[in-house]
Image: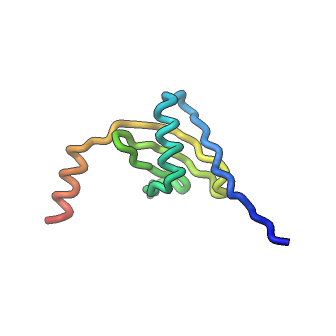
Amino acid sequence: MNMTVQKQRPLLEDLRNHSQEQVSELRVLLSMGAPLRADARRPGFFEVDGDTSVFYIFKYPTGTKILLLGVWERDRVAEMVSCACSAA
């Protein structure tokens, strides 16, 4: 008997009353496999880059739940300066 196991998407919980648009954008990013940038000071905490926002999340080690903790606008000028400095 061949059994197909569907992998459940992790439950996304918003802890700070972010807008529905922000929560939806993060859900899309996670479903597309967007890269997670680990927080070197806090195990299990990550940043996820969206088009205009950065999302700060905690991902449970089991992968069953993700907590949205913060959202802020991406700083395009700082990103360009960072790229220019690392290329030099």
The answer to whether residue 87 is left or right of residue 49 is left
Q: Is residue 72 above or below residue 7?
A: above
Q: Residue furthest left?
A: 88
Determine the residue positioned at 51% across, 29% down.
20
Q: How many marks?
A: 0
Determine the residue positioned at 44% across, 43% down.
55
Q: Position of residue 60 (x, y in %)?
A: 63, 52
Determine the residue positioned at 53% across, 43% down.
27
Q: Residue furthest bottom?
A: 1
Who is closer to the viewer here, 4 or 51?
4
The answer to whether residue 46 is left or right of residue 52 is right
Q: Is residue 45 above or below residue 21?
A: below
The answer to whether residue 58 is left or right of residue 4 is left
Who is closer to the viewer here, 22 or 78?
22
Q: Is residue 87 above or below residue 65?
A: below
Please name the colour scheme applied to the rendered image: rainbow
Q: Position of residue 46 (x, y in %)?
A: 48, 51
The quadrant the C terminus occupies is: bottom left
The quadrant the N terminus occupies is: bottom right
Q: Is residue 86 above or below residue 8?
A: below
